[in-house]
Amino acid sequence: MYKRCIKRWLDFLLSLCGILVLSPVLLIVAVLVRVKLGSPVLFRQERPGRYEKIFTLYKFRTMTDERDEAGNLLPDDRRLTGFGKMLRSTSLDELPELFNILKGDMSVIGPRPLLVRYLPRYNEFQRQRHNVRPGLTGLAQINGRNAITWEEKFAYDVEYVKHLTFAMDVRIFIGTIRAVVKREGISSETNATMEEFMGN
């Protein structure tokens, strides 16, 4: 019952309340991104959602558009500014995803939506992560975030899919607040964000 209908209604109410309450923060961050990083303010990217249906994810920009002499974007660690790092460490860059939740593309709690190009690289076990809506935060995010391996991350995602309950969502929500306050697991050991998933 919770998984089929209650969860979606809770997502809608929580995201709507979040947008209303945090609208001053959204406005301030948008202005700062425009001043410090330029336009566009929002980062838009296609991601796979529930049952691998593609949707457009919204986030605040955290990187510049600096390119090399050949016109290729510089590596993430070269384009990620101090301001961008602050947005990521506080998860403020994720706030526009509240609109994705309101629309029904995402849930408050669920496996994080990854890149479309990863889809053919999953094995059957890992592909189960798409049996629910992707989330703003999830079980992997309170157990290491980007500091754990892809295998560990997918294991947490599938565990969530198989044991999804209201109690688990509450536990993840509380754990997320703790992780954001402590600013844990923001980057992997070898990358400014997370190494690309290349498959198994």
Image: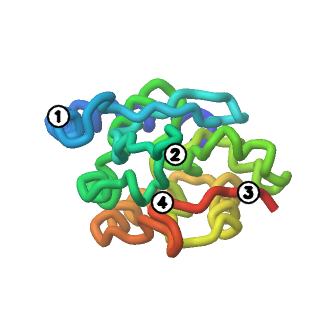
The amino acid type of the residue labelled 4 equals Thr
Q: Residue beneath label 3, please?
A: 198
Location of residue 46 in the rendering, given as x and y in whole percent from the top left corner: 57, 31
Closer to the N terminus: mark 2 or mark 1? 1
Can I make out residue 1 in this image?
Answer: no
Q: Spatial distance from mark 4 to mark 2, Cα to Cα?
A: 18 Å
Q: Residue beneath label 2, please?
A: 135
Closer to the N terminus: mark 3 or mark 1? 1
Q: Check disc 3 and report its element: helix, strand or loop.
A: loop
For residue 119, what is the image quadrant?
A: top right
Which of 33 and 145 lies nearest the eye of the viewer?
33
The amino acid type of the residue labelled 1 equals Val
Q: Residue beneath label 1, please?
A: 31
For residue 130, what is the image quadrant?
A: top right
Location of residue 152 in the rendering, given as x and y in whole percent from the top left corner: 66, 69
The amino acid type of the residue labelled 3 equals Met
The reply to whether dot 4 and dot 2 touch (C-beta < 8 Å) is no
User: Please, is residue 143 above or below residue 101 in the view?
Assistant: below
Q: Check disc 1 and report its element: helix, strand or loop.
A: helix
